[in-house]
Image: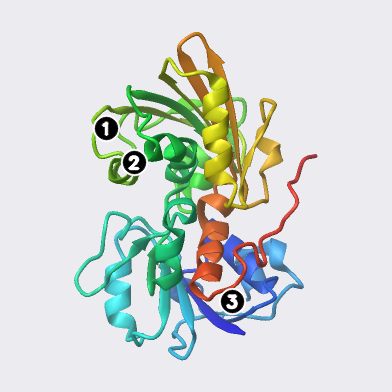
Amino acid sequence: MINAGIIGGAGFTGGELIRILLGHPQVKLCFVQSRSQQGKNIHELHPDLLGETKLTFCAEIDKGVDIVFLCTEHGKSARILEESGLPDTVKIIDLSQDFRLGGKGKYHFIYGLPEVNRDKIKKAGYIANPGCFATAIQLALLPLATHNLLRSEVHVSALTGSTGAGVLADITTHFSWRSSNVSVYKPFRHQHLAEINKTLRELQTDWNQPIRFLPFRGNFTRGIFAALYMQTEKDLAEFLKIYSRYYAAHPFVVLSETNPALKQVINTNKCILYLEKQEDQLLIISIIDNLIKGAAGQAVQNMNLMFGLDETCGLRFKAQAF
C-alpha cells in the first residue's frame, strides 16, 4: 500500500486528486494539507466528496508518507519543498509549472509526460506534471517529432473550460460571464508553449518553426478541445500508421476514426486523437479532460509508474457522455 499526502488540496485539481486517490486500490491517502482551510472537512470545500472520506484539512505535513503531491500555486513549490523537511526518500509529484523546464537547486525533476518519458518516470524520485494545454498539444505532435516530420509551423486553436483557471480566478470564470460567451487570452504567448517546444525540440533537434497557439475560454466547466494543423505532402494513411504504432503501447491515448466530441473524454484519463487531411493540410484534433489527463489523473498515472504498478491502476473511468 502506498501512503500518500497532498499539499494544497483546496483547489479544483486538489479535489480531483483526492477523489482519484480515495478510489485507488493501492493507495492510502494519509493527509491533505491546506493552512487556509485547516480543520475543515474535505467535503466543505469539495462537496462531491460528501460521504467519501472523514479526512479534514490539516496544517502539518506527515513526513512518513511514500509520496507527496504538490497542488499549490505556481511559483511556490521550491520554497515549500525546502521548508517541509521531507526526507529524500519521499517521492514528489509537482502539479505546478515550477519544475517543468528543469530542476532547481538540489532537485532533479523529470518531465512527467508518460507517452514520451515513461522509462525515466519509472526511475524518478521527482516528477514535474505537465500543463493541461501542453498535454493535449504534445500528444497530438509527439509521433511527428519522433519521426522528424515537423517541417512547417503548427497552428493551434484550443478551447478550455473554466476550471482551467483555478478556484481563485477572476470574473472570467463566473457563470454569468462564461455563459453564451467565448474569448481569446494570451494569444501566441501562453506559458505552456515553453514546455511544448522543449519536448518537441528534444525529439526533433532540427525543428525551428513556431507554434502559433490561440487559447480560447469556453462556456463550459472542464475539458480541452485542441485543433492543430500543419502543411505536409505526405498521405493521411502514412500518418495513421505512424500514430497507431507510436501509441500502441500507451493505454490512455486513443485514435478515433470519426471526428470526436469533448464529452467522450470528460471524467477520464484519456486523450482522443483524430487525423484528417485536406489538400496539403494535416488536421489533428486532440481532446482531454483538463483536470484529469491534464492534471490529477496524469499525476496518478505517473505515481503508478514510479511505484511499479500497472499504469492504468485506479484510472479506468467511464466518460460522462450524457
Residue assigned mark 2: 200
Under circle 3, the secondary element is: loop
Instruction: Assess whether mark 2 and mark 1 are in contact (beta carbons under 8 angstroms).
Output: yes
Farthest residue in the top direction? 279
Under circle 1, the secondary element is: loop
Farthest residue in the bottom direction? 64
Residue assigned mark 1: 207
Give the residue drawn at x 66%, y 61%. Answer: 315
Amino acid type indicated by mark 3: Lys
Residue 266 locus on image (x, y percent): 67, 45
Instruction: Assess whether mark 3 and mark 1 are in contact (beta carbons under 8 angstroms).
Output: no
Give the residue drawn at x 34%, y 41%. Answer: 200
- Colour convention of the picture: rainbow
Q: How crowded is mark 2: few (under 14 residues within 10 Å), some or many (20 or more)?
A: many
Is 145 left, or right, of 78 in this rendering? Answer: right
Give the mark nearer the N terminus: 2 vs 3.
3
Whether residue 94 appears in this view of the structure is no
Q: Quadrant of residue 98?
A: bottom left
Give the residue drawn at x 67%, y 30%. Answer: 260
Farthest residue in the right direction? 322
Q: Residues within 10 Å of mark 3 (few under 14, many from 20)?
A: some
- Nearer to us of marks 2 and 3 is 2
Residue assigned mark 3: 40
